[in-house]
Amino acid sequence: MSASVSALPVWGELAAHRSELASTSMRELFGRDPRRGTALAIEHDGVVLDYSKNVITDRTLSLLMRLARDRGLVAGIDAMFGGARINTTEDRAVLHTVLRTPAGGSVLLDGVDVAGSVHQVLDRMSDLADAIRSGRWRGATGRPIRTVVNIGIGGSDLGPAMAYHALREFAHAAVEARFVSNVDGHDIDRVLRGLEPETTLFIVSSKTFTTIETLTNARTARRWLVESLGAEAVGKHFVAVSTNGREVAGFGIDPANMFEFWDWVGGRYSLPSAIGLSLMIVIGPERFREFLAGAHSMDRHFRAAPLEKNLPVLLGLLGIWHRNFCGAQAFAVLPYDQRLALLPAYLQQLDMESNGKSVDRYGRAVGVDTAPILWGAPGTNGQHAFFQMLHQGTTLVPSDFIGVLEPAHTHREHHDLLMANLFAQTRALAFGEPDGSGERPPHRAFPGDRPSNTILVPRLSPYTLGQLLALYEHKVFVQGWIWGVNSFDQWGVELGKKLATGLRDDLESDRTPAWDSSTNALMMRYRRVRRAGTAGRDATTTDEMI
Ligand code: F6P
């Protein structure tokens, strides 16, 4: 593989092509081809992608396809699905797709059938979920479980929390889920408020089982439980999801109550693994398997569809076009569905932790821009917050609008309005409003030519959520592969963790801190308040504190 993707001749051709297109407008492109709106749209298994509202031509697409071919994307896809150790810095295979392989399939990794192990764990998860849902699993005092609290962070939180939020209408009538992630004590206070220890089950979810936030929250939760029910109650109220049996046992959770996953599942790719246990308990094993089936459908499509008709490939390549050739530094995800409110946060980790890298798989400078800043909010709320900038700001922000054709409510008027807004926004971004009379003041001008994709799903269900999840996972894969980065490690989070450990020790001691003058002064301010025992109350403004 060439040192940097930018060394490929097609990269230069794309750059030259972009200059040629500099003065081409979307209005012109749509004018040239009245069928553009349907020609540049594809559908797979009910998921529709309309990518016509981008400043691209047939030549753009054919160059992007050549880029994918010259960069060996098909071989990359085969390598991932085939279990090659493409997570080079951790020497691991990347096989989250096996998590949704139907029962009976077999995928060998180092001679071991990993698909078989996946289904064994799924069966155990189903047993627990059924026991809780039916009331067979009782807490220490004999009462059924009414709340499952997932304790985890990052990939061990965002996925289940996002999916639970999205699939609330499939939830068991009497069993709810809550999620605590932040080490900020306000978070666990909020989550525990109103809960009864006797009817609460904690799921400590951590791939490594060494994550300080999760362990701190888990210890606080255990204290809360033990204070009411005694230490012997822990076995009935704590289960774990992890790859690290030793640490789980060390924490005091019975290994029989541990649900395993594997080092070939990245944290941010782990929702379809046992990390989804809280979701499974609430929506039930059958629905959870529908979610897996949706993801599997997208996996098969990604693996088999020609690049030109491949949804994740198209999304990935369009993102590269905007990021590397049009100068876009950001990317917005705009679900027009309140139930998908947490999707932007989930995709933020997926994308930015996977591809926010400046070194390639071989340790060389990557040489081109990689992951954009990803953010977003549900429509129509975002329209009343940051859409001003999308329409008239100086920064190009390509976006994905996600719409759900059929709502789960009966308020037709609401849904019509919601969808009308989605369609209106993509149209306004693309075409703006031409200054026909020449009399419109500059602040009322809408320049247009702001790219967006529209993704539509028939309804929001476990199946379609699985499709969306896999769609974005594979989009991220496409981009990472083309940029040449390892999308499956996250070394960039290590320094902060290491420093926090050292700084925390300093906060507790009387030693004069010996960091930099800014950090020292900030810590001393905190230490004085901490010592006075008045943190957060009456010590915020006094000058003498410095
Ligand atoms: O932030 C780094 C990270 O390792 C993420 O990749 C991961 O999802 C999160 O922390 C939680 O890790 P764990 O599941 O091991 O607790």
Image (tube, rainbow, N blue to C red):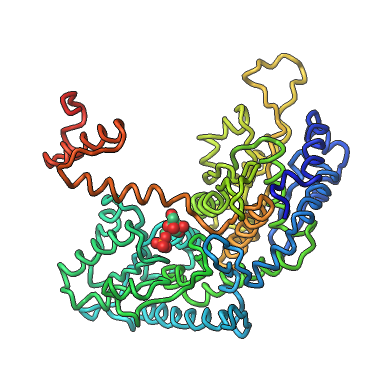
Task: Residue 448 in the image: state x and y as whole percent.
Answer: 70, 31
The quadrant in which residue 47 appears is: bottom right
The residue at the point 54 percent across, 52 percent down is 347
The quadrant in which residue 303 appears is: bottom right
Q: Quadrant of the C terminus?
A: top left
Is 531 situated above or below 110? above
118 on left or right of 298: left
Is 366 situated above or below 247? above
36 on left or right of 301: right
Q: How many marks?
A: 0
Q: Quadrant of the N terminus?
A: bottom right
Is 334 situated above or below 243? above
207 on left or right of 57: left
26 on left or right of 175: right
Task: Residue 263 in the image: state x and y as whole percent.
Answer: 49, 69
Task: Residue 199 in the image: state x and y as whole percent.
Answer: 27, 72
In depth, the one of 486 and 206 nearer the eye is 486
Q: Residue furthest bottom?
A: 104
In this orientation, does residue 165 appear? Answer: no
Q: Residue furthest left?
A: 532
In depth, the one of 448 and 310 nearer the eye is 310
Q: Quadrant of ligand 1?
A: bottom left
The residue at the point 62 percent across, 58 percent down is 406
In depth, the one of 470 and 65 nearer the eye is 65
In this orientation, does residue 261 appear? Answer: yes
The residue at the point 21 percent across, 31 percent down is 540
Task: Residue 361 in the image: state x and y as whole percent.
Answer: 61, 55
